[in-house]
Image (tube, grey):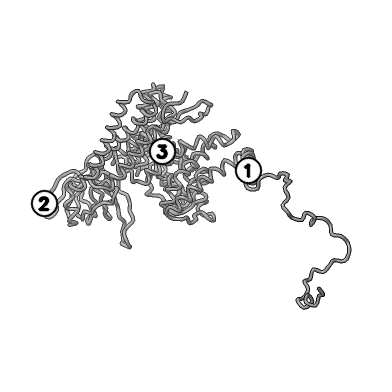
Amino acid sequence: MAGPPLLTRTQGSAGSPKRTDLRLIPAVLVTWSVAFAGSLIDAAWSAALAGVMALVGTLLLVRTRRHRRAVPRARTISATLALAGVLGAAVAVSCAVTANTREGGPLAEAVAEGSGVLIEVRITGVPAEVPAPGHSGGNRWSVEAGLVEVTSKGSVTQGSADVMVVGGNGWQDVRPGQHVRTSGTLKPVREGQAQAALLAAASAPVVLTSAFDVRHSAFDLRRQFVAASGWLPPDPAGLLPGMVTGDTSALPESLKADMKTTGMTHLTAVSGANCSLVLGGFILIARCLRLTRPLAGIFAACGLLAFVVMVGPDPSVLRAAVMGTVGLAALVGGLRGRSLTFLCLATIILLLLDPSMASNVGFLLSVLATLGIILLATRIASWIPSTVPRWLAAGIAVPLSAQLLCGPVIAALQPQFTPYALVANVVAGPLVAPITIFGTFAVPLAAVLPWLAAAPVAVAGVCAGVVAGLARFFAHLPGAALPWAEGPAGVSAMVALSVVSVLVFWMMLHPTGVVHQVMMLHRAVMLTIERGARRKHGRLEACKKSSGRNHLWLLPKTPGPRASRRAPSPGAMRRRPP
């Protein structure tokens, strides 16, 4: 019997067939496309797009209900496309609301005039250092904030809007929850940003009030962990907080450059691997406490939420957290083996919550890396002989599968080829787990009992030091960073290289199969050549019909002097007697 519509069968580890559910892929593609388009158009066009998508979804839904007795595959396709239309309409509405706030909100007039303002905002983010324009001295800092009140040309306006503040010294000390006043100029944001305006602060912030904010406590917790790691050598002291909490403030610039050269920058950003390890650790603790499955799920979800709040809600962290929560809910409900479905649900939920993620490169790379692991990691690991330990096979397959899908996007952003990236990530892969586990365990201890946090910090620091040493070693090898073509040519070349890499990897692990395939290819080529030769020259057959030519020219010549074949001169021919 054929499988359900839009389901493809794959072979499980135990030989039983597993079905990969593809029904949410159209919804992801439509949602992502609408979110990306909505970030580039104004509110009116976003509203029109929402109406079109809602109309299409409604028509498809009505068609599905009318044709209940139709072929199951056709009915399922209609329902899938109807769901995609409804979700696309929801995302378009969210884009329209954001665009309307940006175009007609309380900051629209001040942004259009570009005049100086006196503004009061409430800090909602954590300050991050940004490169200073030109050769101006001093550091520049950016932080997200929410509008409280703005004064422009003598008129005071109150309202709600998100603002990105960029300022000089003094802004690095602001904390979430603080109510500050400053002056500056409001400017329009770049396309794709969710904020309503960009505030170029001309003065340092003046703190008016300070309310409790859990993000403030999380920021202090990260700072205390950085201080608790300060006794380590410079490289692990800067790398350990980055791999555990995402705080790269103490990371040396030289090490940051070497990690970028070797393609290991993703290790300094908290992503799916860290969230998966944290979630698995909390589930293991719940099992040790003999909690029931629902209680274990609630305990693990709360632990994951605390971890996300501690490290900050970056797009990659949110994607990994939402995917882990959805997968945990499915596990509690008895559903397993639906990794692609979990990824699609996580992507749709995040795009519904924040459509601006559609234009975020980090979010795109995070989704592509997870997709590569889901689709390719198990298959690539199965190619490796059973004599190799499974943890080592997984350590090779996971970074390879992630890099295969992320490579073309990275080549488009940074036209550079790092030949040692795969080897460096494979070697450093087994060290990520102890760094995450011991480091996460040391974060709360650093705030409560700093002396007790020294032991887990030491273990995680040794592993972080090895990772830093690997980055520096591979970064200084010959040919560590090779130039690559730009534009579509570079992307196409990287896609071709990814395909060739998979083929070469399979050929190295299956020499017998390669010989068999070569022999089959040789046989097919020979048969093709023989058939072509028969069509072109035909077959040799006996023919009795004479062509009229002299058939004796092939016989041997008679012995004796040969007669001259020289033609007589014209005079000799005239003297010849008749």
Q: Is residue 302 visible?
A: no
The residue depicted at 32 percent of the width and 25 percent of the height is: 67
Amino acid type, callout 2: Ser
Q: Residue furthest left?
A: 154
Near-viewer residue (346 or 437)? 346
Near-viewer residue (518 or 313)? 518
The quarter of the picture where residue 384 lies is top right
Near-viewer residue (477 or 104)? 104
Q: Residues under labels 2 and 3: Cα distance?
A: 47 Å
- Left or right of residue 558, residue 461 in this image: left
Residue on which disc 3 sits? 272
Q: Is residue 40 visible?
A: yes
- Left or right of residue 541, residue 277 in this image: left
Q: Residues under labels 3 and 1: Cα distance?
A: 55 Å
- Residue 531, numbered label: 1
In the picture shown, does residue 441 fall above or below 150? above
Residue on which disc 2 sits? 155
On the image, the x and y values in percent for residue 525 come to: 62, 44
Amino acid type, callout 3: Gly
The residue depicted at 60 percent of the width and 39 percent of the height is: 509
